[in-house]
Amino acid sequence: MNLFHRSADINSHGNIRSIRTWEADIREGRMAIGPDLAASILKEANYSGQRKVEQRDVGVYAEMMRRGLWELSDPITFAKLNGNLTLVNGQHRLQAVIAFGREVEFRVAVNLCSTPEEVRALYYRFDTVMRVRSNQQILNAIDLAATHGVSKGIAAATYGAIGVIANGFTVPNNYTVKTEAVAKLRIVDLRVEACEPWWPAARRIEEALKGAQTDLKPRILRGSTFAVALMTMRYQEAKAFDFWRGTARNDGLKRNDPRHVFVRDLTARDVSSGAHGQGVVAAALAWNAWFEGRSLSIIKVPQNHVLRIAGTPVNGRKG
């Protein structure tokens, strides 16, 4: 029950008739919130217009708590109207406390409001201005490029491609993220850790892309395409170096050379569509033909394509 559905607790003059017992425990500043308190807040004081709970976000927060990665950040925020508290920011974090099953320390803020309209305005302020940092902001903060001896462009491409690889080569978005991939996609420490075995391949790709045509290199660095580049370079370094260098330079390639066909495809395809993201499949089909010594005239991505990247563990078989 929330602020706008508690008329039995407030008389016609706006005076409180009763106070929920847990409200006396809420104080501004740092405080520990356990599962029982979190459940009471969510049941009795969650803002009525809150967005639907995203269980993936809850799972990520709970995993961070379990791994000791949780840090104090934005406060759990309440609006206080006529002595009654309404939660306006923090429902996913409180759901995570319940999933975690132990107390977690938060910063708590209480904002005094004079009218229900002020409560609504406070909620929407949090709802519209809170944004996740971009990948580039994260990379700048942790300086992956300098740490691993690559350019910022290659560091960003690797960080992005790992999300595709961790998600089973399905380009991640709100609808395609697989449950087992959520932590690696959303928790920065785990995603950076997942990049570790791929840095040697990333450095070799950077060497292969030297002299790349200016319009091709950004397309190769897209997450879906770069995921295939990393996989091929890690498991078939010599052949992959020739494939990606030839593609990037596009210099004197024969008409039916899969690399030449791939170049045409790179400049024309919508890489985000399709079951795996067509950028993944198109890159794999071009690589497979070249790796196996086959000519290629066009890249067709069939629906429900079973992904195979020749010479790597991605073999088109499940399990």
Image (cartoon, rainbow, N blue to C red):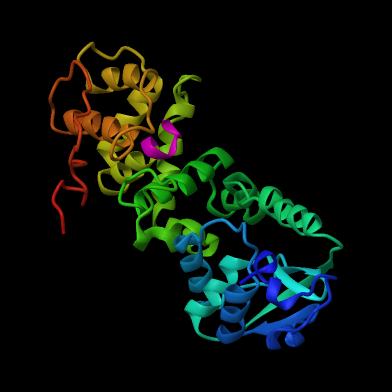
Count all numbered tags in the image, as a single digit.
0
Q: Is residue 273 visible?
A: yes
Please provide percent x and percent y for residue 169: 31, 46
Left or right, residue 307 beside residue 274: left
Examine the rendered structure and indicate whether residue 42 appears above or below residue 260.
below
290 left or right of 227 in image = left
Measured along the vertical axis of the image, is residue 212 above or below residue 42? above
Residue at x-position 71% and y-position 49%: 129
Q: Is residue 222 magenta?
A: yes
Per the rendered image, the range of residues in magenta is: 220-225
Horizontal and vertical percent position of residue 317: 13, 50
Q: Can you tell which quarter of the image residue 74 is in? A: bottom right
Tell me where residue 203 appears, x and y as whole percent. Answer: 45, 44
The quadrant of the rendering that contains the N terminus is bottom right
Tell which of 145 and 90 is nearer to you: 90
| Position above or below: 259 against 154 | above
Q: Is residue 274 magenta?
A: no
**Residue at the front extreme of this rendering:** 12
Report if residue 103 is visible in the image: no
Residue 247 x/y as whole percent: 34, 24
Q: Is residue 312 above or below residue 36?
A: above
Dominant SS of magenta comes to helix
Q: Residue at left 23%, top 22%?
A: 299
> Which residue corresponds to the image point at 79% horizontal and 71% vertical from the top-left?
109
User: In the picture, which quadrant includes the C terminus?
Assistant: bottom left
Q: Quadrant of residue 245?
A: top left
Tell whether 141 sits left or right of 316.
Answer: right
